[in-house]
Image (spheres, rainbow, N blue to C red):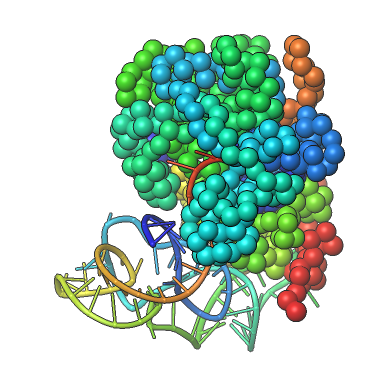
Amino acid sequence: MGDIVGPMTSSRVLTAVAWPYANGPRHIGHVSGFGVPSDVYSRYMRMSGHQVLMVSGTDEHGTPISVQAEKEGVPVRELADKYNRVIVEDLQGLGLSYDLFTRTTTKNHYRVTQEMFLSLHRNGYVVARPTRGAISPSTGRTLPDRYIEGTCPICGYASARGDQCDNCGNQLDPIDLIDPRSRINGETPQFVETEHFFLDLPALAESLTEWLKTREDWRPNVIKFSQHLIDDLKPRAITRDLDWGVPVPLDGWRDEPMKRLYVWFDAVIGYLSASIEWAARTGDPDAWQSWWLDPETTASYFMGKDNIVFHSVIWPGILLGHNGQGDHGGEPGTFGVLDLPTEVVSSEYLTMSGSKFSSSRGHVIYVGDFLREFGPDALRYFIAVAGPENQDTDFTWEEFVRRNNTELAAQWGNLVNRAVSMAWKNVGAIPQPGELQDVDRTLLDASRAAFDVVGEALSHSHFKHGIGEVMRIVGLANQYLSETEPWKLKDDPSRRDTVLWTVLQVVSDCNVMFTPFMPHSAQKIYQMLGGEGVWAALPQLRTVSEDGGPDYPVLMGDYASAAAVWASRPIVPGTPLAKPEPLYAKLDDKLAETGPEWAPIEHEG
RNA sequence: GGCGGGGUAGCUCAGUUGGUGAGAGCGCACGACUCAUAAUCGUGAGGUCGCGGGUUCGAAUCCCGCCCUCGCUACCA
């Protein structure tokens, strides 16, 4: 059995995955940033014996969802329901193994969010103060800076955004714009004095700094960016003038129709509320505590780089304040002394033609469309091997077709196919090996050694390195077949069977190591080699109820009972084999030139 | 403007704490094999490691300056 490598000695792992925003369907850039990496990590951790709790949900509050609802002419809750379901189905289709994927519009989430707020308030880390902000006169809602445009007071550019002028690059305050107007409906914003609650980050700065000093193994961009932010913290408003969100649970505020908690304040609390909901749904309401109150638990957060500030500063600040561990102390809050993040893993951006995915510019490939045409493992493979792990990465159909056809299908799929075919044709079962030769042992040793190398890489979220090492073993196995030429050993069946057994064992090993990356095909290969039952469990879509609230869909799954273990699994000679079917379909080269109908490549002209 | 990431073979990228003659895949050329999804295996061509200085016995790898590019810049999510 392969050792659990690296510093991961704790047995419990909390995988906290960024919450997709439910104002529309998600594109492949989103899932390449948080979805697939967090799932590969969680599946690996489960296979190596850790108890994993992987939670997330759709983020459904905030101005953009209200705006989108008006645009579509539906009530805001209806809009949230619609995109919640679309996103849930996309993530299920990808095979992301959430222990619970829920949403922020549950009663449970409202309760947990309000308790967190109250704990912070009691400890004095949340304070009310008057502030001036823009609102829409027709709706009374907060108008975020970027929803305001006008003429730049510095350069005279007519379409400057409220926060920054795209023409001269200067940072702006929306109140300084000449002739300001709302980008939503063109009306003139009203700048009003209003009272809001602020998270007192300066009162948490010292504690945050001390904590951040202990975080040494984060990706460099995350740690540097965070340290820089902490040098200059200002109090941050955590309420908005809005009717869509979690109410402020204080007298005088509770029934105020236009005061709600800021969407980001409630969204990060989702990690905790989802854990609590998960515990309740599994019949042990206190089970979440093992992942939140035990400092030995590893808590790994996954997100795109635009979310770093919320996970490395704001959320830890909220936790410290709740725990009474800020610069002026306090009492542990409602939920006890909660663990801060151990790892904050941030991805860069998947770009298209060098720019961010953008639905408004037609630069978008939706997850649902992609899955319908190509299936989950082709996308998962691509993201793992060519995703934006360390730097912005351009998605091209040409690259996707090439990776799929020459790597996934030709190198790995064909190895499985040729090995199983030969054994099936000659023996009809997994052959009985004779005495091993050096060439056999060399390949087997390389394959076994890879478990530690790949495991080490995955435990540190080095996905490209991990999957590259597995592909290297696949290459060694193809070389091995060229050298040993089992198809020429008809007059030496014992040697032939030894070679076929060897290569099948290595196919099995590679399949174990590919399992976190491609659970769907891993299950098929497992069965192809005689395995029975569930090897790599997939998430299930369930409809659940909540007292006093409407039913809603969630993803859950019974992953612990799956057979997958991170170790070489001895294949059993004599196990009957069937004629194999190709696992990975090759794509038409024309796709590389034209793109699919639903996302055609635009040629310049 | 400030901060951060990149700039390595035609393309996409690896290159741990500076050290044997700089790597992989794809593409290209030639060859081998024919079990397999016309897959696989071998050989070869091809690089001033963005530019200019510096530290060092020695730098793609450290320091300084510059150029190009992408992103972030917190009350957008």
Relative to the observer, which residue lies in front, A420 or A469? Answer: A469
| Quarter of the figure with residue A78 | top right
Write the residue at 48% across / 23% down. A128
Give residue A69's position: percent from left, percent from top.
78, 38
**Residue A578 seen in the figure:** yes
Relative to the observer, which residue lies in front, A325 or A154? Answer: A154
Write the residue at 32% across / 20% down. A328
**A595 lies left or right of B55:** right
**A473 lies left or right of A296:** right
| Quarter of the figure with residue A21 | top right
Q: Is residue A149 above or below residue A551?
A: below
Give residue A417's position: percent from left, percent from top.
73, 56
Relative to the observer, which residue lies in front, A216 or A114? Answer: A114
Q: Is residue A182 above or below residue A398?
A: above
**B55 lies left or right of A453:** left
Give residue A70's position: percent from left, percent from top.
79, 39
**Residue A424 seen in the figure:** no
The number of numbered discs placed on residues in the rendered structure image is: 0
Which quadrant does the C terminus of chain A fall into?
bottom right
Q: Is residue A508 above or below residue A411?
A: above
Write the residue at 85% across / 39% down. A73
Give residue A180's position: percent from left, percent from top.
63, 51
Write the residue at 78% across / 29% down. A77
